[in-house]
Amino acid sequence: MDIITHKKISAALCGTPLEIRKGYSRAELRTTAEMAADEQGLVHGGFIFGLADYAAMIAVNHPNVVLGGADVKFLKPVRVGELVTAEARVTEEKGKKQIVSVTVARGDDKIFAGEFACFVLDKHVLEG
């Protein structure tokens, strides 16, 4: 299945898609020194959220999908150099709204979980 949304996303910042099918995606992100929040190598949570958001967008896979809200939990810290993988599943569809459940793991260790409310719009959000 081709990815038809968020085509200009930076793989270095938001992850690389590994698998995509209707209502499902999996993507991974190798964390880098540029993502560090401090000298100890703690990765800023925004990069983990970015990976999860990107996985949610490609699970919906519509050119006009946008994020309306998210309820997330950061479960464990991530260090620079670690590889993390997001799995996203559309769990509910109500008209233009799709709920996507996303988990991010480091191997078998779950580090993030969330529910993303995605909306499929009739036209691009920036079109007047």
Image: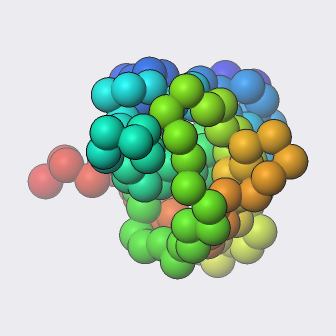
Point 43% across, 73% down: residue = 69
User: Residue 46: percent from the left, percent from the top?
Assistant: 38, 52
* Left or right: 20 as drawn, with respect to 80: right
Q: Residue placed at 75% from the left, 57% from the top?
A: 110
**Residue closer to the observer: 88 or 12:** 12
Q: From the viewer's perspective, is residue 22 above or below residue 97?
A: above
Residue reaching furthest to the right? 108
Residue 63 vertical placement versus 90 (above, below): above
Tell me the quarter of the picture where residue 22 sits.
Answer: top right
Q: Nearer the viewer, residue 8 or 83?
A: 83
* Display colour scheme: rainbow
Going by the image, does 51 lie left or right of 101? left
Do we see residue 68 in this rendering? yes
In the depicted view, which residue is nearer to us: 79 or 85?
79
Q: Is residue 24 placed above or below 70 in the rendered structure?
A: above
Confirm whether residue 9 shows in the render.
Answer: no
Please give left or right for residue 105 compared with residue 66 in the image. Answer: right
Picture quadrant where residue 2 is located: top right
Image location (x, y in percent) of residue 30: 57, 26
Residue at the far left in the pictured view: 128
Horizontal and vertical percent position of residue 83: 65, 31
Tell me residue 52's x, y (percent).
Answer: 56, 51
Which residue is nearer to you in this view: 44 or 79?
79
Give left or right: position of 71 versus 27. Answer: left
> Which quarter of the figure is the N terminus placed in?
top right
Q: How many marks?
A: 0
Q: Residue at x 48, y 64 (%)?
A: 119
